[in-house]
Amino acid sequence: MNKIFNINSALTIFIKDFRSELRTRYALNALIMFVITTLAIILFAIANEAPSIEISAGILWIVIFFSAMSGMARTFVSEEERGTVMTLHLIAKPSTVFFGKLLFNLILLFLMNIFTVVLYLILIPSFIIKSYDIFLLTIFLGTIGLSAASTIIAAIIAKSNTKGTLYPVLSFPILLPLLMIVIKSTKSALEGIEIAKAMGDFQVMIAYFVVITAVSYLLFDYVWKD
Amino acid sequence: MVFKIILGIGLTLVIIAGIALPMVSNPSSFFELPVVPGLEDKARIIFFHVPTAWVCVIAFITALIYGIQYLRTKEILYDIKSVTAAGLGFLFCILATVTGAIWSKFSWGAFWNWDPRQTSIFVLLLIYGAYFALRSSIEVEEKRASLSAVYSIIAGLTVPFFIFIIPRIVSSLHPDPIINPQGKIHMNPTMLVIFLASLTGFTAVYYWMFNLRVRFSKLMYQQQMKEQE
Amino acid sequence: MEFLNQNSLYIVLIITLICWFGIFGYLFSLDKKIKKLEDKINKE
């Protein structure tokens, strides 16, 4: 099988998805409202008590995880719903489709996470970051790892009958190693540890992203083909 | 046939030896086990708890391998083998979690501590539960087989990570892993023999169950094919 | 009751052996049944 892909084609797919989302804006609005609603529920549930460092780090990633679950499946599911899967099959190699969709999910998740983090910083009073470098790197590496895993799982569930429910069920266990490391690293950022000490965590995050992307790339052909 | 008789007798001996051999402070003969301070008789669970976890790992790796084979050849037999292995792995994972919880209760006082090893085995249950949820949500046989194969590969890759790596990097309540960093095995020889025999026995039982289920599924599949003609 | 408390380990042993023989016997009979079915189907 010819595994060389064209970066331009992948970019084209990304731009197509990006443009269609911008045009209709259904998804964007829903996702923004999802983040706001979830944070509102959390604020309501906390009720003025200041959660401990571990809890606030954990809750941040819960919100990010579930926002990803609402948003990351769109690229594949919308193709199924609009009936454009066949066209995509014809015009592009599977690996091209994969990288285009992955890029889209990456950018989308980045935007969502920046929004979530900013809101979280403003709304949760006890969430005070002491080591900004660790925090930013964690968000960055966590986002790319999260989007890589979400993309391949989204491709898998797009063909099933119980898409929406199945998506978090399939994704959570696969994402758990990443979530554990990322929460630990966020906690370190809140505690003010120097970046040199947190390097081990970052290595795991990078390894996770590399392994998941490599495996997804190899397996995507089988998921995509009929 | 002979192997099955050997297995029957062998595991029976393991059970008897594991439970009935006396535990003394200074084992002098081969037929005496050392006392583990604090645990005493309850340490015998190691002969049964660890093999279930071990078989679980083997089963999930088998599911991964047959998943790969299915994707390569598209032979439905490999899908049958992959799902059977995943099912047995799930069964032994439940057994490992339950026996682990029992050990946890009388060792550290609570059935569940969210200790990294316990969390890992629980996550494995989630992963393979999701596997069966995925399978039941796709009706087209070929699509189901290929998507399950892909998922079993991704899931199977996380198994070594959970079972071997996490307990090393995060500090845990769990007793020392048997194969520790220095590569030495610290068990008393009698215990080692019983332990390894138990491991072999459980693996053989797993393999027998696997074999039976695959044969049965094959028969069902052939029957189905015949009815469709 | 005293007897049971004294020899509880042996009670555990007997129960385990009963479970094991039960499972073993079940697997054995399944094996025989499947073999019979296979022979039947392969003969046709």
Image: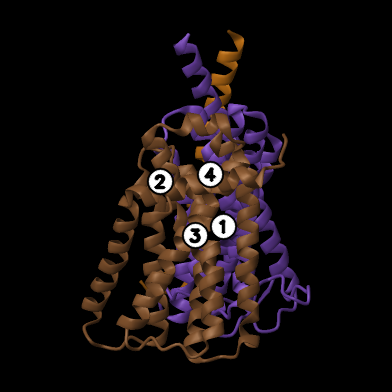
Chain colours: A brown, B purple, C orange
Please, is residue A52 above or below residue A154 in the view?
below
Tell me which residue sits at (30%, 81%) in the image.
A123
Residue B162 visible in the shown view = yes
Tags 2 and 1 in contact by the CB under 8 Å rule? no
Which chain's residue wears label 1?
Answer: B
The nearer-to-camera label among 2 and 3 is 2
Q: Nearer the viewer, residue A208 or B15?
A: A208
Earlier-in-chain disc, 4 versus 2: 4
Q: Mark 2: which amino acid?
A: Ser
Question: For numbered disc 1, what is the local secondary structure?
Answer: helix
Horizontal and vertical percent for residue A116? 38, 71
Q: Chain of mark 4?
A: A
- Which residue was labeled with disc 4? A13
Name the residue at 57% across, 73% down: B43
Are dots 2 and 3 in contact, CB under 8 Å? no
> Spatial distance from mark 2 to mark 3, Cα to Cα?
14 Å
Q: Is A146 placed above or below A97 here?
A: below
Counting from the top left corner in percent of width and height, residue B152 is at 56, 46
Residue that badge 3 annotates:
A107
Taking the image as drawn, is residue C13 in sight? no
Q: Amino acid at mark 3?
A: Ile
Disc 3, disc 4: CB below 8 Å? no
Q: Residues within 10 Å of mark 1 (few under 14, many from 20)?
A: many
Using the image, name the chain to which the residue with label 2 belongs: A
SS at circle 4: helix
- Name the side, left or right, on which A116 lies relative to B35: left
Three-letter amino acid code at the position of disc 1: Thr
In this figure, which residue is indicated by the disc labeled 1? B52
Q: Which residue is mark 2?
A: A20
* x 55%, y 63%: residue: A144
